[in-house]
Amino acid sequence: MADSPAPILSFEECSRLFEDVQRAAKSSGVSDVEALIAGHREALTRFANNTIHQNVAEQAQWLSVRVQLDHKTARATTNRFDGDSIRSVVEQAIALTKSVAPDPELLPLAQAAPIPQLARFDPAAAAATPLDRAKDVSEAIRVVEGAGQTAAGIYSTGQAVEAIFNSQGVTGWHSETSAQFSITAIAEDSSGWAKASATERSAMDPVGFARRASNKARLSANPRELPPGHYTVVLEPAAVLDLVGQIFGDFSATALHDQRSFLTDRLGKKLFGENINIYDDVAHPLQSGVPYDGEGVARRKLTLVDAGVPREVAYSRASARRAGVEPTGHGFPLPNEIGEAPMNIVIAGGGTSIDEMIASTGRGVLVSRFWYIREVDPYEKIMTGMTRDGTFLIEDGHVVAGLRNFRFNQGIIELLNNVEALSPAVRASGEEAFDMVVPAMKAKGFHFTEVTRF
């Protein structure tokens, strides 16, 4: 399969598909119809034991049709775009809709409104070949291997298209490319890790990432064991993403209505430190994603937290109607039970570098990343999890040794009240949450509960 620098599904192709959907619906006497159309092409090079061992490529497309009849709605999906398959999926959607119970709160289909365009298609990422990725991976492996360590990871490139059309005139189409590189450097008793993603291939620096991972593995060799307790921490952006990223599903009007959000009875009240400012902004230059939601409503920027005070939450059309406000463009495709959520998190940064945070710390712990995070208390947002791939002791303003990994028990609300310094925000990748724009954080009183076995 040859990669192409053009979007996998053009606007014109998606528009013609919807015309076919509408025609099939009308022939069955149905006028209210919505179509979600998507396609992606992704290729991945995987390496382990300092050797490239796998290259895979996938191309897929799908069409999801939703109809509305008498306060009922349902959808059906197909991955075939021929005329017979389109007619069949429309018939399935109609049959499913007739069989479900009516929803008296179901709104009519969204009305047409302007949707902003975001330019996030990089021909270099779309056209990247296995040889392109292999060259970059080979150079990264040489860095790690030259340090007497073992490298493992992935390098993926690809593109995706998402579109939404409905019979009320909603028209949304978005194309986007992606590149992601992740590497772990493994030594005898330590490891280091680096990962990044972007919409442009030029943002990938495999050799630089390999050096970072290798240095972490080298510096954390022969790790010391530090007693559990409360410590000042310097959390690198990936660690901030992994931990703080756990709370944003609660910034949802539906979650508040159902009283399953930690913001219940707290919205508009000071909850975090004054240096905490958080936004949802799909148009941020370091963000990625579609500029409209699952019903075709344009996403607008939200001020989730302003100087420590939770201010705004995401609204779908249904939750907005219930609250008597305008939707924010964060709803998921119907039917669903989740409602909505912010998807493009930006935590505002500060002007303190990680090196400066370390230099100002008398005794503390530098954390590269977290993993295996689980919720202990949903209202206080207390989480447990572990450090990994580079945990270090800071003494007298210097990193002096690697540390055995910790398990922690830490409230995120408490953490965001104890932040003493913020670095400039960057796009960060982790394992526990989707990519966000976040800073590194220095915070006091982080609770490590035990030393782990690995």
Image: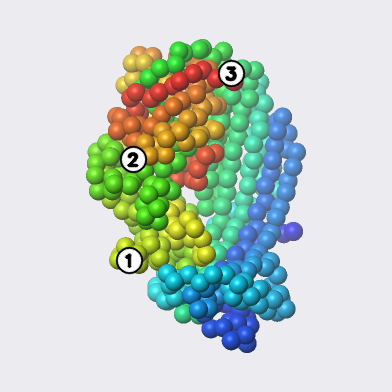
Residue under circle 3? 453
Tell me the amino acid under the disc marked 1.
Answer: Glu
Residue 111 at what x, y percent from top left? 42, 76
Select label 2 or label 1 by which is in front: 1
Residue under circle 1? 326
Quadrant of the image occupied by residue 282: bottom left
Residue under circle 2? 349
Distance (Cα) linking label 2 and label 1: 29 Å
Q: Secondary structure at mark 1?
A: loop
Distance (Cα) linking label 2 and label 3: 34 Å
Picture layout, residue 432 above or below residue 447? below
Left/right placement of residue 266 relative to residue 377 reads: left
Residue in view at x 74 percent, y 59 percent? 1
Select label 2 or label 3 by which is in front: 3
Q: Residues within 10 Å of mark 3 (few under 14, many from 20)?
A: few
- Nearest to N terminus: mark 2 or mark 3: 2
Residue 383 at what x, y percent from top left? 45, 33
* Quadrant occupied by the C terminus: top right
Quadrant of the image occupied by residue 271: top left
Distance (Cα) linking label 1 and label 3: 51 Å
Q: Residues within 10 Å of mark 1 (few under 14, many from 20)?
A: few
Q: Secondary structure at mark 3?
A: loop
Residue in view at x 51 percent, y 34 percent? 373
Tell me the amino acid under the disc marked 2.
Answer: Gly
